[in-house]
Amino acid sequence: MNSLAAAIRAALLTADPRAKCFAARDVARRWRLGKLGFVFDTAMPDEPARPDRPELLPPRDMPKRGKFGSPRGQIALWHSLAHIEFVAIDLALDMAGRFGEQMGEQFVSDFLWVAADEAMHFALLARKLESMGSHYGALPAHGGLWQAAHETRHDVAARLAIVPMVLEARGLDVTPATRDRVRGAGDEHGARILERILDDEIRHVAFGSKHFMQVARSRAANPQDLWKCLVREHFRGGLKPPFNDSARLAAGLSREFYEGVAS
């Protein structure tokens, strides 16, 4: 039986976007079917493999998207969303592969489910771009999205606090407004894609919250206090309102977490 760690590492080191999507979903499927052993015999890479395109730029060097109603602005929006979901595949895979032995089989199952979801989201967005006459890689992309994973590679609590409970939770805040703008522009197909992503991301943040609570209990720490400490230590950007309180609460993030650290 193949080892789980080796399968996850192979998916992380797959550069081609379509192949990475297939690899992530295949790892999740084989794990679910009992075809991968709970064996961690190889380390996760410091960086996942990336395709030659898109060009990755520092946030300050990213070109402006242009007006939303313009074809250029719409393509830039969907390209940005596709890149976020592409990096999210690797974030979920690395979570399962780096911390799975420490956290257990349910943790692995949860984050491989997330990886498969993110692969599906990316595929939907890549097809959306192609329907508009573009493709993933046609524009530059944000080069700093992996930084949070790299900086929290030493501590599962820090990784859970920053990736699902800050970065993915931010998606819960901004996606409804983006969906409404897309729908208001007459793009019902795009709005449905965003609704699907929003529904799935609530579950993803809930996985992060659930396992963070378990880690906090194991450390005899107050979950809200531990989270705030880790956010202040590892997250450089401020938490900016408005917050989607109902979606955050559904994902296990009460206002007690982010009150006092929001800018």
Image: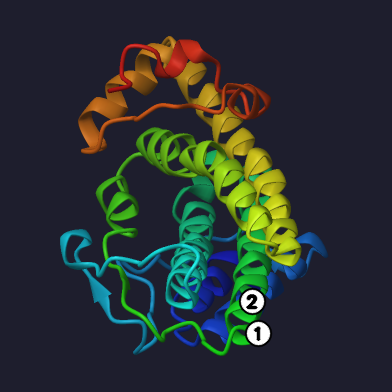
Locate residue 250, reporting x and y percent.
68, 26
Quarter location, residue 34: bottom right
Q: Amino acid at mark 2?
A: Lys
Residue pictured at 35% horizontal, 30% vertical: 240
* Residue 223 at least partly seen: no
Q: Secondary structure at mark 2?
A: helix
Check the image and report above or below for 85 versus 244. Answer: below
CB contact under 8 Å: marks 2 and 1: yes
- Horizontal relation, residue 246 to residue 253: left or right: right
In the rendered image, the vertical position of residue 2 relative to residue 19, given as above or below: above
- Give the class, few, some or many, for how many residues have Cα within 10 Å of label 2's Cα (few <14, many ≥20): many
Relative side of 195 to 33, left or right: left
Which mark is drawn over residue 252? none
Q: Position of residue 11 (x, y in %)?
A: 53, 76
Question: Which part of the image, by quadrant, shows the N terminus?
Answer: bottom right
Residue extending farthest to the right is: 33
Is 236 placed left or right of 169 in the picture?
left
Alpha-carbon neighbours of circle 1 within 10 Å: few (<14), some, or many (≥20)? few
Give the residue drawn at x 70%, y 61%: 193
Indicate the position of residue 232 as horizontal and vertical percent values.
24, 26
Residue beneath label 2, please? 128
Amino acid carrying mark 1 in the image? Ser
- The structure residue drawn at horizontal position 56% and vertical position 79%, both measured from the top left corner, is 20
Q: Which residue is mark 1?
A: 131
